[in-house]
């Protein structure tokens, strides 16, 4: 029964190494359409080293038989798998294959797994029974459908540790995931992006030292060699080096009291720990000085790294994702799912993970991160906008109510006291103008935002317009000195909308007057040649100045179209007061809508002024005076 000649029965056991090889050759040569081989990691060696088997596969392929080969590819059999690739039609990899079998259209053979190294098996089950053959074909198809590309597996093995190879690997060992997670962080040179799905995920990552490592990296001047792999990055970090560029670390994580305490102990602060006025993100500098900011402008220019945290404030079931996502240098990603978030141990909480250096995969996770990051930022801005809008509604309703009630009240008094008609009409007119100004401001905001603000440009002397504004304000306010510092160039001709520029200068001057201390009734001034009064109380004065900023000479007599030789760049107009200065709470958003610290006013004036100046191609800015007294508002206009 153990010889090749004894194969008369449909199913039997073949004994002897030569008989096993001959039976396999018989199955291969008798195949009509296909031959499928599912073998363990030891068989590729035999398929190449046993000449009869090698020739059998080659001849079958030449006869048009579809040959499929499924095995576990590893470093030990990689050389032989490479040689098998051209000998078969399709070659795939499947980890952990136990057992061997070959199945064709009508026959099935299963050599024993145990055999002497380098030799074929000495025992094999053979069958030509249709039901058994079909059953084995079904098993093969099931295994084949769960396998992966042999080319990809070979490439992965050959480039192990090289992040540029573009591979994707599924990891089902949580301990290995933890090790890879930490090593990837250590290997970072320029950027780390991390999404933590839950508060417990943050605490688990803290317990394994990942959060501390991120803090150390943001402080450290160490950088790995350009070819450093995750596996060798720890050793490289210890050897030292210099960082080529700033390390950017961004983390998105939910927070609670426990997380906030950890961050506080680490000298890191989240927005929720600083109150409503806190920044939207945390800036953590490499110089170990931790500071928060609304904008990254406040980051120390000497810092060579930055760590930022943001956290969503939505309900827990909508927070971030259900998986932890790590992207390092936009060259590698690691994503792992949580199977039991209640577990304190990383290994017990984590399930399958996916490691990838494939660019399309990394870009997908990068897109997810950026979307979440921007979503949190947008949410913060929407909260701020909602707050400002509510404040504006309160202010606007008050501003509208006051003149409206006055108009109604004086209208009633006119009927009751016709002898006071002229006086009452004056009050009605002033309040109607006030009401009209507020309505016009709201309309201007709408025009600026829709970019439909129209300018009627004409040429005029900007110095003359400044004097007109000063005279108009002085006629209403005589307790504050407004001084126009004699300009070195006069006239200064600009091409702009005369009424709109008047509106801007008037608005800035009215604001300066509002926040400047009024002088005593016996205050007096006497004019000097420089335009500043000898007896002027400087604490109750506002100085307005104009100057030309240009690299070329300016001909003040030339009011026609400027030529190339007479071209100037811009005129600078500054308004300096000695008042209370700009409140630190609103300085960064001073020119935004609805921003005001005044008890009166809608908070639209500076926003509209900025829109008008920028529509002319100019700029407007403000800063507190260096001596701590008052502020200076400056605008520039092209000439």
Image (tube, rainbow, N blue to C red):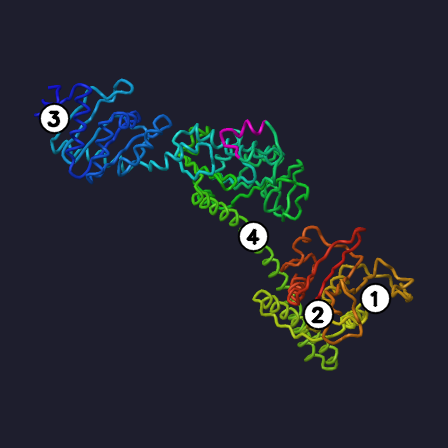
* Distance CA(mark 3)–CA(mark 1): 112 Å
Q: Which residue is label 3 attached to?
A: 11
* Distance CA(mark 3)–CA(mark 2): 102 Å
The quadrant of the image that shows the C terminus is bottom right
Secondary element at tag 4 = helix
Q: Position of residue 248 (x, y in %)?
A: 58, 41
* Distance CA(mark 2)–CA(mark 1): 21 Å
At x 92%, y 62%, the residue is: 534
Crowding at mark 3 (Cα within 10 Å: few <14, some 14-19, many 20+): some
User: Is disc 2 in contact with disc 1, using a CB cutoff of under 8 Å?
Assistant: no
The quadrant of the image that shows the N terminus is top left
Q: Is residue 68 left or right of residue 501?
A: left
Tell me which label, 3 or 2, sits earlier in the chain: 3
* Distance CA(mark 4)–CA(mark 2): 33 Å
Q: Which mark is residue 501?
A: 2
User: Where is residue 32, by image quadrant?
Assistant: top left
Q: Which one is nearer the viewer's eye here, 186 or 204?
A: 186
Q: Which residue is label 4 attached to?
A: 383
Tell me which label, 4 or 3, sits earlier in the chain: 3
Mainly helix, strand or loop, the magenta region? helix
Q: Which mark is residue 488?
A: 1
Q: Is residue 8 magenta?
A: no
């Amino acid at each position: 029964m153990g010889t090749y000649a004894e194969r008369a029965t449909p199913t039997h056991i073949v004994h002897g190494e030569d008989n096993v090889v001959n039976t396999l050759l018989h199955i291969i040569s008798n195949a009509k359409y296909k031959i499928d081989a599912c073998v363990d990691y030891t068989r590729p060696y035999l398929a190449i080293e046993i000449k009869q088997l090698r020739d059998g596969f080659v001849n079958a392929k030449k006869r048009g038989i579809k040959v499929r080969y499924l095995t576990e590819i590893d470093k030990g059999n990689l050389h032989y798998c490479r040689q098998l690739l051209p000998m078969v039609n399709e070659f795939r990899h499947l980890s952990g294959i136990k057992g061997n079998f070959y199945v064709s259209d009508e026959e099935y053979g299963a050599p024993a797994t145990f055999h002497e190294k380098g030799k074929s098996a000495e025992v094999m089950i053979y069958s030509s029974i249709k039901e058994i053959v079909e059953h084995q074909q079904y098993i093969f198809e099931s295994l084949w459908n769960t396998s992966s590309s042999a080319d990809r597996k070979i490439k992965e093995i050959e480039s192990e540790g090289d992040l540029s190879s573009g591979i994707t690997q599924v990891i089902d060992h949580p301990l290995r995931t933890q090790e890879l997670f930490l090593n990837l962080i250590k290997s970072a040179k320029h950027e780390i992006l991390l999404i933590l799905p839950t508060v417990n995920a943050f605490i688990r990552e803290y317990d394994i030292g990942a959060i501390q490592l991120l803090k150390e990296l943001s402080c450290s001047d160490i950088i790995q060699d350009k070819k450093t792999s995750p596996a060798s990055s720890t050793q490289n970090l210890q050897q030292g080096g210099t960082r080529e560029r700033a390390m950017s670390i961004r983390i998105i994580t939910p927070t609670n009291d426990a997380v906030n305490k950890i961050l506080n102990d680490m000298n890191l602060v989240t927005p929720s720990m600083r109150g409503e006025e806190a920044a939207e993100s945390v800036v953590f500098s490499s110089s170990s000085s931790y500071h928060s900011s609304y904008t990254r402008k406040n980051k120390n220019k000497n810092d060579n790294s930055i760590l930022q945290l943001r956290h969503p404030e939505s309900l827990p079931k909508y927070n971030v994702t259900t998986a932890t996502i790590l992207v390092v240098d936009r060259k590698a990603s690691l994503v792992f799912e949580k199977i039991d978030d209640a577990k304190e141990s990383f290994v017990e909480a984590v399930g399958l993970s996916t490691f990838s250096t494939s660019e399309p995969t990394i870009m997908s996770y990068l897109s997810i991160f950026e979307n979440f990051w921007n979503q949190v930022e947008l949410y913060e801005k929407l909260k701020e906008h909602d707050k400002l809008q509510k404040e504006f509604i309160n202010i606007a309703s008050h501003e509208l109510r006051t003149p409206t009630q006055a108009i109604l009240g004086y209208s009633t008094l006119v009927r009751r006291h016709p002898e006071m008609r002229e006086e009452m009409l004056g009050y009605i007119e002033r309040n109607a103008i006030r009401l009209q100004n507020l309505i016009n401001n709201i309309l201007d905001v709408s025009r600026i935002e829709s970019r439909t603000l129209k300018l009627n440009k004409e040429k005029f002397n900007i110095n003359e317009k400044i004097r007109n504004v000063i005279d108009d304000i002085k006629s209403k306010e005589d307790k504050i000195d407004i001084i126009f510092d004699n300009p070195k160039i006069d006239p200064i001709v600009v091409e702009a909308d005369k009424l709109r520029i008047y509106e801007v200068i008037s608005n800035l001057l009215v604001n300066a007057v509002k926040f400047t201390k009024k002088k005593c009734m016996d205050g007096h001034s006497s004019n000097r040649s420089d335009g500043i009064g000898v007896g002027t109380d400087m604490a109750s004065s506002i100085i307005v100045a104009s100057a030309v900023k240009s690299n070329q000479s300016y001909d003040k007599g030339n009011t026609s179209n400027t030529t190339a030789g007479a071209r100037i760049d811009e005129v600078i107009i500054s308004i300096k007061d000695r008042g209370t200065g700009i409140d630190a709470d609103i300085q960064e958003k001073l020119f935004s809508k609805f921003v005001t610290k005044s008890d009166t006013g809608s908070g639209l004036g500076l926003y509209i002024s900025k829109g008008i100046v920028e529509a002319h191609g100019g700029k407007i800015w403000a800063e507190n005076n260096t001596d701590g007294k008052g502020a200076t508002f400056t605008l520039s206009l092209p000439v």
